[in-house]
Each structure stands twice: as structure tokens, then as C-alpha cells.
Image (cartoon, rainbow, N blue to C red):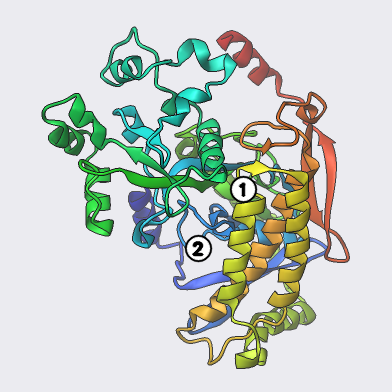
Amino acid sequence: IRRARVAAVAATPSVMVIGGLEARRLLVDDRGVAGVLAAGQFSACLLPTRRIVLATGGLGGLFGHTTNPLGAVGQGVALAARAGAALVDMEFVQFHPTGMVWPPSVMGILVTEGVRGEGGILLNKDGQRFMFGDIPENYKAQTADNAEEGWRYCQGDKNARRPPELLTRDHVARCIVREIKHGRGGPHGGVFLDISWIKQKLPDAAEHIKRKLPCMYHQFKELADIDITQEPMEVGPTTHYVMGGVRVDAETQMSNVPGLFAAGECAAGINGANRLGGNSLSDIIVFGKRAGEFAAKFARSQKHGVPSEQQIGEAARRALEPFDFGTKGEPPYQIQSDLQGMMQELVGIVRRKDEMARALEGLGALQQRARKTGVPGNREYNPGWHTALDLRNLLTVSEAVTRSALEREESRGAHFREDFPEKDATFGKVNLVVWKGADGGMQLRREPIPKMPDYLERVIKEMK
């Protein structure tokens, strides 16, 4: 679907596709969006415009392990925040429980639920199947309490209950983190996901796995020389999706900055506190189309933006600043690595006030270091320069996530507070909104959740 749509856009005569450029600064005036500064390996350009649609995806690059591609550094969310847009629900980050942690060639790559659905089990370093020891009370009626029943479920027995490895993503992820924190993890900081054990149950287990899980088998065999029919995989929670993002109007997808639209993962509001698997495809198709339509409609009523010379000069100066420090500045890769490690450890799946307070202090120190980032050479083929620019996005979004997670003193959806493990009805009535203040500092406030439209209330009542 994606390839077909991209090809269709590229073949449309009225659409000009400019490859190899990344948006680095949104320019605004008193009427809203005025333009965008973009930069690539060879050139930079200024595009005056009165409408911009952000469709930049997620922010997995904030953390040490992620299923996201390398460019998912929260770019759109950070650009919008620096342009004056409000962000919402930034505390809700979804971690998939089973991403590869070893070897490095496959680190972060998703091991799908299908592996557990076909009978894959989670083991700690002692060989204990630990998920049976932590089945939430509200799921006990639907969850197998013994290995035999769990296996029958995986074989299609409709009278059997599902194994605990198939509990919700956030719960399975927290159980894995607990095993690791208590010293029961594997040698590379994960636990073991084993599908090879089914050879005890099936005489043709290897062929069964290859037939049922062809992508998983070939992917890990080719990229890491791991034969999942013969050995377990070392896995751990990996950042997968963010429910928060740019706050947009549900009908138009426009932010509070006139002319700035957002759709897909960089926009907030569609998934609440936790995304259900499979929702994103319909999200991008429906709301991507809506964003494009309303952006076009908005453009017809506006003249082209004319960014001020001062804004253009400041944006260009900031973009080229790493070259001023050159080899005397700190390499950006070390700052990026330190940030990812800190966010993974202190603002990951299991959160506590003291750890997040440490994270905020750490972010302040990293921001100071990032201001003196230096790269040698020039723009051509210089990934270090782009990493230095990405740091600004990473630090902006990391602060938004951390401040929001610290403020929400409850556990809800993908957000789990070890010091506040239950839901709080007070927080259930509010969204946490963050934005950049006039002084550049991150501000936060609680806002009542908007009233649900009548037609949605009727649909929900009918479903109940």
C-alpha cells in the first residue's frame, strides 16, 4: 500500500518531490506558518509557505532500543514545539515486549506476537517460565494457569485459555523488566523467547516453525545466524510507538499554529493512553487524507508566507553552528548515546519520581553539552552534522516526555508508575499539555478532556 501511494504521488505532475532534504526549522510570523528551512548533504533551501503537513512518524530514537527506523527522532514533534505548537499525551509511550537485544546486527528488531501465538515461551536465565507467576486478577479468567492448557490454545483449542505470554504488551513488558532488574535476565540484558521447545510436542517442529513464521525464521537466520527452530532468542522491551504528539483539531488536523497540520504518529489524540495493534494503518490513511485536504483548502485562502530575514539568518546560524566548534566541540554521537541510555533506564517502562527527577537533571546537563557539539568538515556526506542537528529534536522531545510522565502520578495505559501503580480518577479526566514558553522553557498544564461527540457516545453505548 505504501509503495503504491508513494509511486502515485511521484507520478502526479502537479506534485514536486524533493529528495534528500530534512526539515530543520519551521518559520512563523503573526499569521502562522511562514516557511520551512530544509537541509541535506549537498544543499539547503528555504521554502516559503503558509501550510505544512507533518508526517514524520515516531520518536523511538529517544531510547536505547527501538523498532523504529534510524530517522525516528521526534523530528516533527520537536519542530512543531519550537514553532509554538502545543503537544499532548507525551507521557504515553508504547514499548513492545519482545525486541531483539542481541546480537547487535538485529538489536531492536521486533519479534512479533506471532512467535508467542505459535507457542513461544518467555524464560529467565534460570530457565523459569516466569509469566505464570504474574497474571493480573482481571485477566485470570481468560488466561491459562498451566503450560498444557496454554499449548492447547496455541494449537487452536477453542476451549483452552490463552497462555500468559499473550497478555497485554505493557504487562508483558513490565514482567520482563522485573526479571532483568532482579538479576534474572540474560547475559545481554534481556530474557529468552523460545519457540524451539515445541519440538517436544511436534515431530516436525522445525518445518512447522518455518511454515508458520517464515519472516521471523529467515530474518534472524540471515541477519544474525540465529536459527529460531533450534535456539531461543534474547529479547527485551523495545520502544515501538508514541500515543502523544502534536495536538491537532480532530476534523482538520491543524495545530494551534495556523497552517501547521500533523497526521500519523507525530499527531496525538487518536489512540488515547495505549494503541491497539493494527490501528496505525487506518489512522494514517484516514487522517493523512484529512490533513492533506484541509491543508489544500487552507492554502487557497492564504498568500505565500514571507519569513523575516532575522528568522532566516538565525535558523541558518543555528544549523551551521556545529561547524564553528569543529574538532574542539564534543562529538554528537556520545551525547546521543548518553541520552538514549538515560531515557531507557530512567524514563522507560517502569517509572518512578526519583528516577525521572534525575532524568530532568541529566537532560539539563546534556542540553549544555549539545550547545557545544562540534563536527569537522563541511555539509557534504557528513552524518555527524545531521546527528548534531537531530540532538536538538531528541532533547526537546525527551524533556516533553519526562515532564509529562513525572506529572501524571498514576498508572494508565502504556504509562506505568511504580510509585503510583493504580489509576487515579482525577487524572482520568485530564490531558497533560506541554509547550515551549516565551523564554524557550518547557511549560505544562492540565486540561479537561474534551467532551466526546454525541455520535461517538452512541456508538460506544451500542457496542456495550
Left or right: where 32 falls relative to 244: right
Left or right: where 338 falls relative to 156: right
- Classify 10 Å Cα crowding around label 2: few (below 14), some (14-19), many (20 and above): some
Looking at the figure, which quarter contains the N terminus? top left
Residue 446: x and y in percent read 84, 39
Choose top left, top right, bottom left or bottom right for residue 365: bottom right
Between 75 and 37, the one lying in front of the other is 75
- The mark that comes first in sequence, 2 or 1, is 2
Numbered mark located on residue 348 in the image: 1
Report whether residue 90 is seen: yes
Residue with the most extreme front position: 126
Is disc 2 placed on a helix, strand or loop? loop
Amino acid at pointer 2: Gly
- Nearer to us of marks 2 and 1 is 1
Contact (CB < 8 A) between labels 2 and 1? no
Choose top left, top right, bottom left or bottom right for residue 54: bottom right
Residue 248: x and y in percent read 69, 44
Residue at image coords 59%, 60%: 341
Residue at image coords 31%, 37%: 194
Report whether residue 113 is seen: no
Looking at the rendered structure, the number of numbered marks drawn on it comes to 2
Numbered mark located on residue 71 in the image: 2
Numbered mark located on residue 43 in the image: none
Residue 135: x and y in percent read 52, 21
Amino acid at pointer 1: Gly
Residue with the most extreme right position: 439
Between 205 and 411, the one lying in front of the other is 205
Is disc 1 placed on a helix, strand or loop? loop
From this view, report whether residue 403 is shown above or below residue 113: below
Residue 115: x and y in percent read 32, 35
Residue at image coords 59%, 61%: 340
Looking at the figure, which quarter contains the C terminus? top right
